[in-house]
Image (cartoon, rainbow, N blue to C red):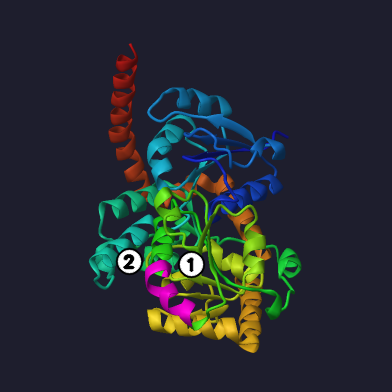
Amino acid sequence: MQNKKLLIISSVWVEPTSSAAGSRMLQLIYFFQSCGFEITYASTSVSSDFAFDLTKIGVSCQLVKMNDSTFNAFVSDLQPDVVLFDRFMVEEQFGWRVSESCPDAIRLLDTEDLHCLRDARKEAYRKQIEFSETMLFSDVAKREIASIYRSDLTLMISEVEMELLQSFFKVDQGLLFYLPILVNESKADELFEKSAFEERTDFVFIGNFLHEPNWNCVQVLKSEIWPVLSKKLPKANLLIYGAYPSHKVHQLNNPKERFFIKGRAESAAEVIQSARVLLAPIRFGAGIKGKLLEAMLYGTPSVTTSIGAEAMHGDLPWNGFIEDTNEGFIERAVELYANPSIWETARQHGLEIIRKRFSEADFLSGLQAEIDYLMSNIEVHRQQNFIGALLQHHTLQSTRYMSKYIEAKNANEVK
């Protein structure tokens, strides 16, 4: 029997040490391999020094071009059974070509987080106004929701975003599948650092600086949180880690203030495990925050905001504290840092959240069953998604001609 084929299309290569998104993509790759898929990973960008070598785990790699018919030839030759688009912008670029060349292939979309929600919250924060759902009516939302409808199934990382899509945008539940960042429960028990309260020092923040909410977090820590917190705990340092720090990030480094920009962490596990408390005053964003999940995994309590903790802990107590005011945030950070019993209770809460909310055993069998169903019943499934068929038809007409125009224009410029 011929192996099933999966094609993943992305604008970037997999960098699990740079972001939670990279870790999640690697999880998906391992999952599909366990289901017996041969995997090809196609990207529009050149590989970086920090990219994971997918060929070492048996994944074929392919560089592809946007607005270029060579992709049609490539995908027609490959004939994948399933195509996974890494975020809606990629589906916009390549979805119609996949539909044209491989109409029977299952089209999956991985959102990572809802970009329209992240952008609306960012706009509210920038204007210093309260966020409201009416702010979601944006061009980004129209594009993103259209992409979800055109896909056979969309993987959602957040229950809050699942609910938003169904209640506010009226997306049918049958088009969505809840799949958070996952943790192997037996590995979680091994990774949960047993080091004592006294063996840990300092505060830590970690996050990819290409992600704007992370850069904003560091600015808030520098200007609003640390000037007060550092006076209350004069022996503590604040260590800032993250991939792709720019010159303006490095300019914030100030040893006299005990505020250290450390740059990329060779091992996120080591820097989080050695810290006593993780700080994440997240003001806007969406999805699940990988840094906060890693803090739970490595037994490090955290102080964050409502947006930071969103969709992560359900009805369970947090791995530390959730505070939306600077005063409350600072007070709770001092409590966690200075009180061993509060600290120990907090990290036990984190382990409970992982076991009850992020165990891979609770999700992967369901995802496999969903994909198996789609592969056997795709015609019936698509007949129940008329809006998707409508959008697919019009996208094929409009995007195809725009893309062909750009392709012809590029060809003429080369001449």
Judging from the image, what secondary structure is the residue with disc 2 in? Answer: loop
Q: Which residue is mark 1?
A: 256
Q: Which mark, residue 168?
A: 2
Q: CA distance from mark 1 to mark 2?
A: 49 Å
Q: Is residue 154 above or below residue 346?
A: above
Q: Which mark, residue 227?
A: none
Q: Residue at x 73, y 35 (%)?
A: 1
Q: Is residue 111 visible?
A: yes
Q: Residue at x 65, y 77 (%)?
A: 352
- Nearest to the observer: residue 383 or residue 80: 80
Badge 1 density bin: few <14, some 14–19, many ≥20, Cα 10 Å: few
As for residue 225 lying within the magenta part, the answer is yes
Badge 2 density bin: few <14, some 14–19, many ≥20, Cα 10 Å: few
Q: Is residue 305 above or below residue 174?
A: below
Q: Residue at x 30, y 26 (%)?
A: 406
Q: Position of residue 2 (x, y in %)?
A: 70, 33
The amino acid type of the residue labelled 2 equals: Phe
**What is the magenta range?**
221-231
- Nearest to the observer: residue 374 or residue 181: 181
Q: Is residue 101 above or below residue 189?
A: above
> Which SS type dominates the magenta stretch?
helix
Asked whether disc 1 touches disc 2, contact meaning CB atoms under 8 Å apart, the reply is no
Question: In which quadrant is the C terminus drawn?
Answer: top left
Q: Position of residue 98 (x, y in %)?
A: 46, 34
The amino acid type of the residue labelled 1 equals: Lys
Q: Earlier in the sequence, mark 1 or mark 2?
A: 2
Among the 4 quarters of the image, the one containing residue 412: top left
Q: Position of residue 410 (x, y in %)?
A: 32, 21
- Nearest to the observer: residue 231 or residue 185: 231
Q: Is residue 163 visible?
A: no
Horizontal arrangement in the rendering, residue 262 relative to residue 116 (left or right): right
As for residue 92 lying within the magenta part, the answer is no
